[in-house]
Image (spheres, coloured by chain):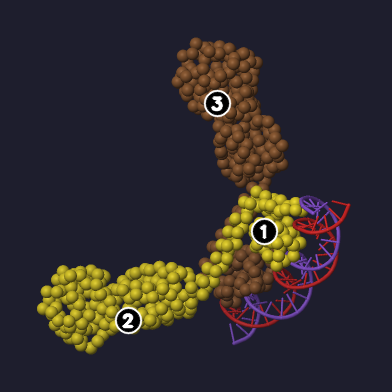
Chain colours: A yellow, B brown, C red, D purple
Amino acid sequence: MDQRIELRHLRYFVAVAEELHFGRAAQRLHIAQPALSQQIRQLEKIVGVELFRRTSRSVRLTEAGAAFQPRARNLLGRLAADLDEAGRVGRGEAGRLDVAFITSATAIVSEHLRAFSCRRPDVQVKLHDGFTTDVLAALERGTADVGIVRDAEERDAIELSLLASERFVAVIPTEHPAARGDRVEAGALAADPLILFPRSAGTHAFDLNTQPLRNAGIDVQVAQECSNWHTIIMFVAAGLGVSIAPYSVTTLLPAGARRLELDGPPTVSRILMATRRGDDRPLLQAFIAASESRQAIATTGR
Amino acid sequence: MDQRIELRHLRYFVAVAEELHFGRAAQRLHIAQPALSQQIRQLEKIVGVELFRRTSRSVRLTEAGAAFQPRARNLLGRLAADLDEAGRVGRGEAGRLDVAFITSATAIVSEHLRAFSCRRPDVQVKLHDGFTTDVLAALERGTADVGIVRDAEERDAIELSLLASERFVAVIPTEHPAARGDRVEAGALAADPLILFPRSAGTHAFDLNTQPLRNAGIDVQVAQECSNWHTIIMFVAAGLGVSIAPYSVTTLLPAGARRLELDGPPTVSRILMATRRGDDRPLLQAFIAASESRQAIATTGR
DNA sequence: TCTATCAATAAGCTCAAACTATGGATCAGC
DNA sequence: GCTGATCCATAGTTTGAGCTTATTGATAGA
């Protein structure tokens, strides 16, 4: 009883249980037969009951042995699988990744995810969407491993890398006079009510988003505030006003809305991946690296 | 890689993962700290990845380590449970017992089972009912561990022990003239059609069963043959004739049937437990031993 | 009765897991 | 900034558990 069981005991037991012959089992295990007999005897002492009934001519399992055999086999198999799993997690081939992202990056995130999960099918990705502040907070308190935001600035604790850049476009109702063409000058929208998220939701993002209007000398006044792009676009489609949006949120437009390219100096929104500085887990590297192939495509806006 | 993993590695790993401190974990394991460091290092080499990130001031789990910890704990727990289970099976405290019994002994078997499964709640009892020949065949070919039969003779391969004895009683329709009393002389049933199982189903049992009639000088002629007692009794209740039955099959009678004690020299049916000779498993001994307390009760016929 | 088979036992050896002692890195406090 | 405490890693030594070979003992078949 003071003797502790070891996997050796299980491996030897399974071999004997399968061969029902100490000599052959020993051969299979590449040890001599007495060593095997000794170890099995030891195991029986630990368990407290006979596992084999041996005569000098034959070996067979006792009931306890028969009950133990599948369990021992199972245990060894599970252990092997668990070791393998741990190895895969360590190499970043498996595991779980918590990704927090801003809702307006949904399209780009989903493209990126598709690329990533092809490469790492055994990684479970958990998604959390929210506003920029939520995303960064989740990252800092460790709830998320990666944050995906727009146009954030580097901080001491957070490292950024580019996921994609995209231009801004105008979204206007189909009955709008400018809706005939494919392009529009921002100045042509000066008289229309602007539908956008509140500046308080993200100063930097708001300023970038309204840059095309300010470039055209318009005094930006938000007529209708909405917290998410889907609602903004629905309001445009209802004819309540116009909006300026990052390209990717306009890929799917409802019937009443139309997308126009903006004339004038190009302004881009940069979608960034944020990680905690010093977090060099292979899984993270793999996630970031997965962007490289997609980046070009996302930038073209298709 | 040529190094094989052992349970020691798992035990040590779990200790360190829980303490997050090599010194304390070593203390808990009753070994010196360097030995622990060495074994953990070895485990990491086997798995192929780091399981702990150590600085000289702190120890924390890597992702792989965090993934492995619950699995290792689980594995150790399961192994302990499996060892315990094997021990219980070996001592006859758990396991599975296949019991084959003749249908006419159902009442007694169920009483016996209740007593047994109180004592051995972890033993799974599998029941198979059939005719005497089925029961004995199942026992001999190893499909059953115990057979319960009536009045069988010892054979070389089969050992018998008494489970219960019970007297025979008469079963008659309620409109029968003798149904007024509590007792009847077998001779009073001479004119009634006899309902019973065919002699071919069990010569010895048949002869015992009809002994009361033959004692009364009746020439036994079965008017209606049925293979099971339930049907026989239903036929009696329907007024088709009378029968002689072991007490226990008459404990529950339908409306039209009545049980009468038989006058004359008492004849008993002995219910026997049959086991393969030399089968001395503790579980069997326990099953047989469980009868002792019930035997007296069964004999009184209550 | 003899021989072959096969598990158990005996005795010696070997290597790995343990120990003790020490080194090196980091943090707290005067 | 130095000193002491803490704590993991390394080095060298020791011990014992598991392996080996040789042998015994039991059983079945010729």
Measured as percent of width and height from the top left, residue B205 is found at: 62, 26
In whole angstroms, how far apart are the C-alphas of marks 2 and 3?
A: 87 Å
* Quadrant of the drawing holding the N terminus of chain A: bottom right
Instruction: Name which residue type carries label 1.
Output: Glu
* Point 24% across, 75% down: residue: A250
Comparing labels 2 and 3, the label whose residue is closer to the camera: 3
Q: Specify the quadrant of the image occupied by residue C30.
A: bottom right
Instruction: Name which residue type carries label 2.
Output: Ile
Q: Nearer the viewer, residue B98 or B283?
A: B98
* Callouts 2 and 3 in the same chain: no
SS assignment at label 2: helix
Measured as percent of width and height from the top left, residue A59 is found at: 71, 53
Q: Badge 1: few (under 14), some or many (20 or more) residues near its Cα, within 10 Å?
A: some
* Callouts 1 and 3 in the same chain: no
Name the residue tied to disc 3.
B197
Instruction: Name which residue type carries label 3.
Output: Phe
Measured as percent of width and height from the top left, residue B202 is found at: 60, 29
Q: Nearer the viewer, residue A103 or B192?
A: B192
SS assignment at label 3: loop
Name the residue tied to disc 1.
A19
SS assignment at label 1: helix
* Point 54% across, 63% down: residue: B70
- Does label 1 or label 2 sit earlier along the sequence? 1
User: Can residue A49 be seen by looking at this rendering?
Assistant: yes
Name the residue tied to disc 2.
A297
Name the chain under label 2. A
